[in-house]
Amino acid sequence: MLEDEFSDVLKKAQRGTGLSAEALATITGITAAQLRAWSAGKGAPSEDEARAVGAALRMDPGRFADAAAQRWHPEDIAVADVRHHPQAPHPSNGYVFFLDGGEKAALVDPAGVPANLLRILREGKYALQYILITHKHADHCDATADVARAFPQAKIVMHAADVAAIGSLGARALKLSDGDDLPFGQDVRVRMLHTPGHTDGSSSFVFRSTVFTGDTLFAGSVGGAYGDASTYEDILGSVRTKLFALPDDTVIMPGHGPPSKIGWEKAHNPFFAD
Ligand SMILES: [Fe+2]
């Protein structure tokens, strides 16, 4: 199942564009009551209705209609050197990635019940080198102190704009800027992309042909725009200019929902048009 249902996509686009049900009704001729029912998850528009609403919301009309009819889902993807784990009790995704041979590892988003996370991190015979944090929300970083205590040699990495979320640990965090990269083993580098919009400090991390996108880009959707300074236009711009610049076969490992690929999102994500 995709992270966002059609009603979520509709609500995010309405909030982002500032178009109320009444404003959309005026543009599309569909009643505000009907539009409100769809955004509450009751029923779904016809093809023509969905295309009209999608166009009014400055989305790709055909892809928006596909979302309404639940016509697209990414194929299953597994990546050998990346392991996914749920962040219970949160609904978010955590990831550990490895170098060949497994002697070095990095964690993406330390969140959830610390004991679960520490068990996962102690399963392999490796040194945890980095604790990478995609953004400041609790479901992505509320176990930072526990992981940092258990792996004191691991470097905490995040963008300065979100670092207040980890309290006093922020002082020892590596605050990277867009395009900075970190050495990982002999010849691999982990690159940080600053992708603001969901939060001001939202970041994505590129490891080989995988990108961890946090709540910036999901399969078939984007995160909500909750930045203090950054906006809905910023999150769309972050995806267009930073993430869609990656090769099409780059695997997306998002903060919520299933993995996807850059090429698939370019072709199917309703928030973007050709
Ligand atoms: Fe978030």
Image: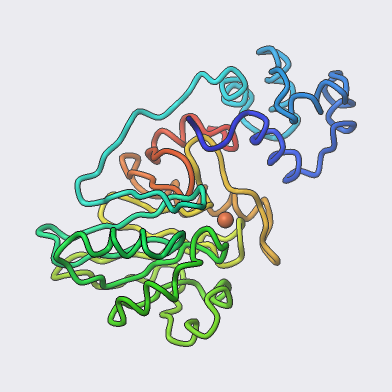
Describe residue 227's horizontal placement relative to residue 113 as left or right.
right
Could you say where residue 201 lies in the image, as x and y percent from the top left? 56, 67
Location of residue 180 (image quadrant): bottom left
Could you say where residue 273 lies in the image, as x and y percent from the top left? 57, 33
Could you say where residue 123 lies in the image, as x and y percent from the top left? 21, 59
Report the label total. 0
Q: Nearer the viewer, residue 172 or 245?
A: 172
Q: Nearer the viewer, residue 123 or 141?
A: 123
Q: Nearer the viewer, residue 146 or 188?
A: 146
Residue ID at (60%, 52%):
235
Residue ID at (82%, 20%):
34
Residue ID at (69%, 33%):
10
Describe residue 63's horizontal placement relative to residue 39 as left or right.
left
View quadrant of ligand 1: bottom right
20 is higher (above) or lower (below) than 193: above
16 is higher (above) or lower (below) than 192: above
Indicate the colouring scheme: rainbow
Location of residue 261 (image quadrant): top left
Q: Nearer the viewer, residue 223 or 151?
A: 151
Could you say where residue 69 lies in the image, as x and y percent from the top left? 59, 17
240 is higher (above) or lower (below) than 264: below
Residue ID at (50%, 52%):
89
Residue closest to the far front:
115
